[in-house]
Image (tube, rainbow, N blue to C red):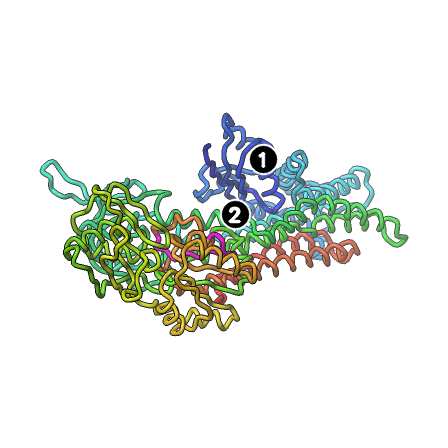
Amino acid sequence: MEQIHWKVEGMTCANCALTIHKFLEKQGQQAVNVNLVNGEVNFTLKPETSTQQLAKGIENLGYHVHEAAHDHATKTGFLRTPISKFFFCLPFTLLLNMHMLVHGQSMHWLMKPWVQFALCLPVFAIGMSYFGRSAWASIRNGMPNMNVLIAIGALAAFVYSLTGTLFNLGPDYQFYETTATIITLVFLGYWLEDISMAKTQKALRELSKEQKLKANMIAFDDQHQEQIFPVDSSTLKTGDLLLIRTGEHVPMDAKILWGECTVNEAIITGESEPILKKAKEALIGGSVLESGTVKAQVTAVGKDTVLSRIIDLATRAQGEKPPIQQLADKISAVFVPVVLGLALLCFVINLALPHVTLTQSLMRSVAVLVIACPCAMGLATPAAIAVGMGRAAKNGILFRDPKSLELFRNIKTVVFDKTGTLTTGAFTITNYGFNKSMSEEDFKRICYSLEKFSTHPMAQTIAREWKSKEVRWTSIEEKKGAGMEAIDAEGNIYRIGSEAWIGVGASEAGHQVYLSRRGILVGWIDLADEVRPEAKQVIEYFHQKKIKTVMLSGDSREKCMAMAKMLGIDEVYAEKKPDEKLEIIARLNAGTPTAMVGDGINDAPALAKANIGISLGEASQLAMQHADVVLLNKGLSHLPMALGLGRHTYGTIRTNLFWAFIYNVLAIPIAAAGLLNPGIAALAMGFSDVVLALNSLRLQVRTVN
């Protein structure tokens, strides 16, 4: 089934997003996701469904569809943008309000009813072509949006004024300036809202810019002489050869064929410290060569690059909704009908009061319609998530969904794997031994032939350092958390792995890796690994936050206890297999909310079982499916930031929802009491969205650790 990615313009509130979502689901589309902040709409296309018909249906609802979701839609044409509409309406609105700004006989002609009508008509036409069309379409779809309130408020004031003009009822019936002011100031609010929302996307836009680069492509002429051609990075294909020099960006993901260099990968990891890269090592598109010159081969382009996957993952996460948003969505879904009812009730009650005129009753009802802003409640969550996710992605922290942000606030226990998590995973062989049943060459060859198929860091070190001619196995299998098992052509069963799995006697205990043949121990290997320099500081951070730290490892108890003592870890579980790790995580989860930090491979079941699974991995390992959070900086240094961003983003969401709710609770009675005229109400409505967006933007700069 085809995945559709669209960019949709014109969404101004949660009801707009719900309208599009509901329309697509009615048409039978699946996995619908509508992102209010950046306007992206993603869904799985139902077979035999026309995308043209779907796009036309969304256009009929009052929105505009661009078929490339990641293209920045540029609004062109006369009066297409909120700011162009605002500046078109502004002169007419100022003239209509001039009698309140300048007193004297010179302005008296502006008060004539038909002059007021003529000045208001262009503004009313522009406003109703946008608000009225959108309002009517949303009503037909069964999901009234905020434009219903604006359209009814402006229409009521206009019809009331036009009635007074036609029947010459006097100045008490002239409220053309109210109609114009509502429409003009709402367009101003939308423009300010667009600016605020664009700022929330700043981090992801900066990442996207790094994808559009120039490249030096290597080609060969008829005489097989090397030629260099400058090309746009978007034209590159997998397998193309590149020349990358000092100071240049890596245009696409590539593998070094010749030369070495130091690379700044801050665009991906948030760490500006240069990294040495040699032949056969990977370069990440968007990173910068700080020194050296290399020839490299393109390994991924377009949406398959690391940077594209980061942007895609972060963008999708921004569009998803955490549990806290569900309440806001339910409120937004019924908000417009409730406000319409309140406005009608306000009109009836005020009309029944002896000292309130028909005109005053109508204007108070119009003010209620305009001041009641479901936009603020709808933007409270997505605005904060957009900023939090964007800042996280810019620093090499990828949240798979917003639920992780919400769960972080309750975490009381953090569980660490040992190898590759608390340690660097960069092992070296320090010692080895074998019995007289085989030669040193055979011992190394067998170890290499077994370990080359394993993903464990120790195994990869052995395979790298002892690379030789392979033994051909009739079968080979990796036993997670234990080691490798293989059978050769003669039927001999070989095992290489942990002490517990091989079954080692007391006299040979204490080594990291053992080799057996037909159940008999034939050799052992010792490897050394470094503790990550940032590990102790991260553990201390969690202790400061009153969070319990636990080590959960398959390594020997002696080594685990020594490391735990050095780092100050509270509790240790050693010599545990994957199924045992799973049981321990389940038990810890039952007691307190628990996060698990691992390498995302051997610890996959435990990562999936934890309340939050946090994976440490290189950028090429983004496909890990079991972690809720992926840290791309090859270490623990950004783990405090991940926790802090989760907690502060959730806190910002709660603050936004509180103020959005309080705003409506206070503003509606004030408007109903006649203490706000409709023009001021329109201005206040527009600025309420901006205030929440600015509060969310504080996440970009505030200290979150």
Using residue 275 as the reference point, say whether residue 383 is left or right of it: right
Dot 1 amino acid type: Glu
Instruction: Estimate the x, y position of residue 120 in percent, counting from the top left.
Output: 68, 43
Q: Can you tell which quarter of the image residue 617 is in? A: bottom left
Residue 611 highlighted magenta (yes or no): yes
Q: Nearer the viewer, residue 580 or 697?
A: 580
Instruction: Estimate the x, y position of residue 123 in percent, counting from the top left.
Output: 64, 43
On screen, 6 above or below 555?
Answer: above
Q: Which residue is mark 1?
A: 25
Q: Can you tell which quarter of the image residue 240 is in? A: top left
Instruction: Estimate the x, y position of residue 413 in percent, counting from the top left.
Output: 51, 64
The residue at the far right in this view is 354
Which circle marks residue 319 in the picture?
2
Span highlighted in magenta in the image: 608-619
Using residue 572 as the reference point, say whether residue 129 is left or right of it: right
On screen, 481 above or below 530?
Answer: above
Dot 2 amino acid type: Gly
Q: Nearer the viewer, residue 477 or 662?
A: 477
